[in-house]
Amino acid sequence: MDSVLNKFYKNHNLLYKVFLFVATTFLIVYLFPKSGTFRYSFEKGKPWQSENLYAPFDFAIQKSNEELKEERQQIANESPVFFEVDTAKVTQISNRYKAVFERSFFEVTEQKLKNNLYQFGEKLLSELYTVGVLSERYNIDNEQTISVLIGNIQSKTVAYSQFFVQTDLKSYITSKIEDSEYAEFLPAYLSLFYDVVEPNSKYNTSLSESALKDRLDRIVLVRGRVDKGTLIVSKGEVVQGDKLSILKSLESEYESQVWTEANYVWILVAYTVLVALALLMLLLFLRKYRDDIFSNNTKVTFIFFNIALMVLLTTLVVNYNSAYIYAVPLCILPLVLKAFFDARLGLFTHVVTVLLLGFVVANNYEYMFLQIIAGIVTILTVSELYKRANLFISVGQITLIYIISYFSFYVIHEGSIDGLKWENFLLFVLCGLATLFVQPLIYAYEKLFGLVSDVSLLELSDTNSKLLKELSDKAPGTFHHSLNVANLAEASANEIGANAMLVRVGALYHDIGKMSNPTYFTENQSTGTNPHDELSPKESAQIIVNHVINGVEIAKKNKLPDRVIDFIRTHHGTSYVRYFYNKQMEITTEFAPSDYMYNGPKPFSKETAILMMCDSVEAASKSLKDPTSTKINEFVDTIIANQIEAAQFLNANITFKEIESIKKVLKHKLANMYHLRIEYPE
């Protein structure tokens, strides 16, 4: 049992990666659409590039969206519309007319004239209610046939224009009276009809909508059938007209085929294999080219989490409305990975993610082309993410690339810009704006995964920070030394293309452990007394060695990132405290050399190797007397040669060419620090 547990413990890193790989694969497969996929690609007006295509099964030819829309519109125009007319109300209105007429025309005393006025008004009232009076005007064509319902029984059909709308009452009465011999009685007639006329007709919503729905439900969505084995399109034949309709129908048939018990397992296995291959390529890339990341489970989890997040986000948008697919800020992925790792890993992961999303989106070639190009532009243009102006400029360039690529694809497909969906350009702008969310996202990731980006490094490089101010107060000499080393290391990193911001921050904090015993280090001894005079060489060596251990403890207490702590741990590697080692040798040769050796580890990156070189050169340069260019050159060569001979850079991925470039920078910088000038002849 113990042997099994020991074996499990030894391989727990690998087992975790296997679990992460399997879990991510199944999660992505679960998010994929549960339907078949048409394996051919075709475009309207373009030749068929594949072999002759025969119908794999019987299927119906579906009507296009335009055909269905036209047919629905025609049915909507022809569908019966029902209006209810209350004839009993006409009788009530007629009876009320008599009473109201007497009030309105009481001033007319001549009986004959009064009778004529009464009959004229009665005639107008009868015309108003020939069919019926409506309270409002409906959005119905005047020539639309209306079925009139009296007591829920259809009595006749009339044109909609034959109904009178109550809101037209004033204009109607005015026109009739002004053209008659009774124009002087217009105010009385208006008062009369305003009091008498009431709507007696209304739109029957339930019957009308039911009749329309019944007719729409009877629409046939297909207009023919293709039998299995029928030749659909030949190689080289232009895809248009009926050929295009049949191909779209076949594609739709594939996509509408829900997984059945018969093919469920096979499709699931196929999806799983393809997703697993893509993720496996990413793991192999990490294993071969980014072993430090591969060995860190947190970083691998972070990468896989971002891939799954992008697939999830894209799937949600596609399921909601695929028209918004270009609003998904996929370029956040390479931005984030470049901020925490490097550009090459960011681009490789982005490409793998886009390949996976090809299963989810329609027009997958166009989508993949746009996203890969945008990802490349992101990697090439975004530098120094902590500078806000750079991010805004890069996002503008990414948005422009999206727009240009989409426009070009549309012209290729359609041959013109007629019908171009300009709203997609707005989606690209929204995508660019959403990409700006990368800044708060990076901050959140730093807290969740314990990673560090250039943005945080910029904050840590502030010499007014609490920890660096404490260093300048307790160990001013060490603080000045750290500033000099930071300047040397930054210049060296820029020379060979390393992370200059990271190595500068590492240099600023590499000696914070000296705050525990500042006077035991020569740069902080201002009184002329040396406390090492009272100690044995072994005790002195232990104090010097312990500044690395103390530095790691102080860094962890102040929650410095691991990437910065690595500089504290490695800046002396496994070298000896040479001064006290030699002093002990003068006393006796019988001692343990390990007592005078730093615990390591050795530098394991270009940045940590740069710091070791710069720290040693800067510290030792203080012992130079009457420095000249020749002395400085020999001095730098000797120190770095000793480090190479001690195999201090064996684990760092730094080349001899890069070391020579660093030496050149150090020589130039030291010459400037000592203000060396050319000696002119007298």
Image: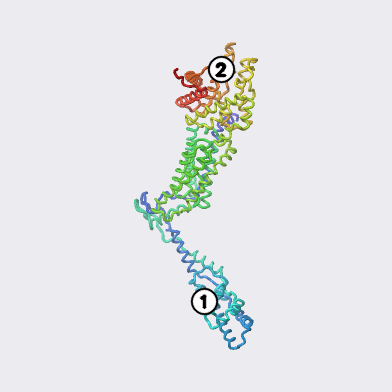
- Considering the numbered disc 1 on the image, is that residue within a helix, a strand or a loop? strand
Residue closest to the eye, 224 or 413: 413
Is residue 269 in view? Answer: no
Residue, far left: 236
Q: Position of residue 186 (x, y in %)?
A: 57, 79
* Quarter of the figure with the N terminus: top right
- Considering the numbered disc 2 on the image, is that residue within a helix, a strand or a loop? helix
* Quarter of the figure with the C terminus: top left
Q: Position of residue 441 (x, y in %)?
A: 56, 41
Q: Which residue is mark 2?
A: 578
Q: Position of residue 475 (x, y in %)?
A: 62, 25
Q: Which residue is mark 1?
A: 156
Q: Of circles 2 and 1, which is in front?
A: 2
Q: Is residue 271 left or right of residue 599?
A: left
The quadrant in which residue 556 appears is: top right
| Mark 2 residue type | Arg
Residue closest to the eye, 85 or 570: 570
